[in-house]
Image: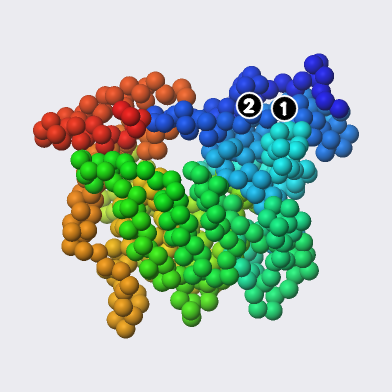
Amino acid sequence: MLPTASQIPRLFAETFHGVDENISEADLYHYTRQRWLKNERDELAKRYLKFNLPHLVEEAVSVCKGARHCTRVLKCIEGLHNKAFILTMDNGAEVFAKLPNPNAGPSHYTTASEVATRQMLRDVFNVPVPRVLAWSCDAANNSVQAEYILEEKVPGVRLGALWHHLTWEKKLAIIDQVVDFDGSLSAMKFKTHGCIYFKEDLQRLTGISDAIQLSSDQQHSTLEQYAMGPLTKAELWASGREQLDIDRGPWQGPQAFARALGANEVTWVRNCAKPRMNYYRSPKHHELPEDALELLAKYEQVASFLVPSTNNEPAAANTLWHPDLHLDNVFVDPDSHIITGIVDWQSAAVAPLFYQSGIHRAFRHYKSVQEGWVMPTKPENFDTLDPNEQKQIDQDLESETLHKYYELQTMKRVPLHWDVLRQSSVHMLRKPVWLVTGVWENQDMFFLRDSLIAIVTQWNEIFGEDTPCPITFSTEELELHAKEEENIDGVGQMLSLFRAQGVLPADGMVQPEDYQIALENCHKYKEIFLNAAGNEDERDLYSRLWPYQEASE
């Protein structure tokens, strides 16, 4: 039964300072966490989601035993890809609701795969994920008029809220728990690479529903209800790709995957790319789709080498992995600090560990890390430094040490993952595969070319002199690339100075209350940036390279 006017729940939004604010119904549908200094209208449109609130409330009440109506809807602090709400009932029960934004990918596939993946994580891997209470991946035929997942509210608190207050021993104990979960995931090896679905859902979505198979002699009876289907990663469906006949998996091996991504991008460029200016490369001449096709041809020639070697079984193992494990995706008991939930499995995939492995963002040190097991130490002149410098050094030391502790525990507890982490060539070889999808619209042509040049340069060290490199770059190509790199680095260094002072955001996103100040800083520091030019032509070029502006400015 739909809520009556007297039963319409009160609407609130979670805030960073811990006090929930009253909001209007319209605020539920809009993205309100941050604002953009560039392309704001497009960015907000990607995150606007209109749904039927009374029917969402009705669905939530129906899954809460003993509840008669919902008294409160809290809009959680937003991520970039989903709307999230906590609905509180008249009997005190709480339900967490998650609805994918338009930029989250194909919401019908995304929702169906996430629900199936989470069920497998609970039943097969014993990973603590919240239980799904109700869901729908068919917005056209449900009353909520959007895809949604209703689930248990995770007990405990987000690790991000506690991390900086925890003792050293507690932090290490939490890393141990995460490494153990890594071990559980990497222990099960699948035959194919793709996203997990329930067989009946995949049959309805694609007409295909072959049961999931494990490699070697592993067996698990509960896997019979699952099937492997296409990847749901948003970039494989964005910018018109949903209308194109491209290969999103599943794949039988890493070579098929690497080649498919290149072929997909060729199809997209031929159908959708238009000439444009790339002022880092040339202030006068357009960058053409043909330039992208030429670079993609080089990628396709080398794609079969951007995979684990035939004798590198750990790297080739198809494993399920968390797509982005940061501190706010982990919930812990505030007293025992035992992990109570790991969330945000949207677009999680089964893929070769070669492409998935890495230090989780929760524990990754973002500056250089010393090689080997040498632990970082304070500089000899530490006591003579000012308090701010000492504080930064202490923070960096802790961050790097935690990074190394994760590596050490992975070596001891999850040797399969460690075998991949320690291979220096893995990072170089998988970089082009990560960059190729969306290379044109993401303006990653330089970075894809740079990654291929690096491989060509170190080819003999990686593959040996007996294996000829299938691609080359001419002297002219290398000179143009070097000039583009010089421009990118020059602009980047100056922007880094501005960002280091805290006057400009690295990603162009600011808190709403800081927006006007950020706009003023943007205009002020653009003028400083332009004044660094040596002449009028250079000033005009700098104006076009300034990142915080609309494309037409």
* Callout 1 amino acid: Leu
Q: Residue at x 72, y 42 (%)?
A: 138
What x and y, as percent, mark residue 438? 43, 50
Which residue corresponds to mark 2? Answer: 28
Residue 86 vertical placement versus 453 (above, below) = above
Q: Are marks 2 and 1 in contact (CB under 8 Å)?
A: yes
- Helix, strand or loop at label 2? It is helix
What x and y, as percent, mark residue 273? 39, 46
- Camera-side residue of 296 and 39: 296
Pick out the residue farthest to the left.
535
What x and y, as percent, mark residue 116? 71, 54
- Camera-side residue of 65 and 290: 290
Distance of mark 2 from mark 1, alpha carbons?
9 Å
Indicate the quadrant where residue 145 lies: top right
Which residue corresponds to mark 1? Answer: 53
Q: Residue at x 61, y 31 (%)?
A: 49
Mark identifier at residue 376: none
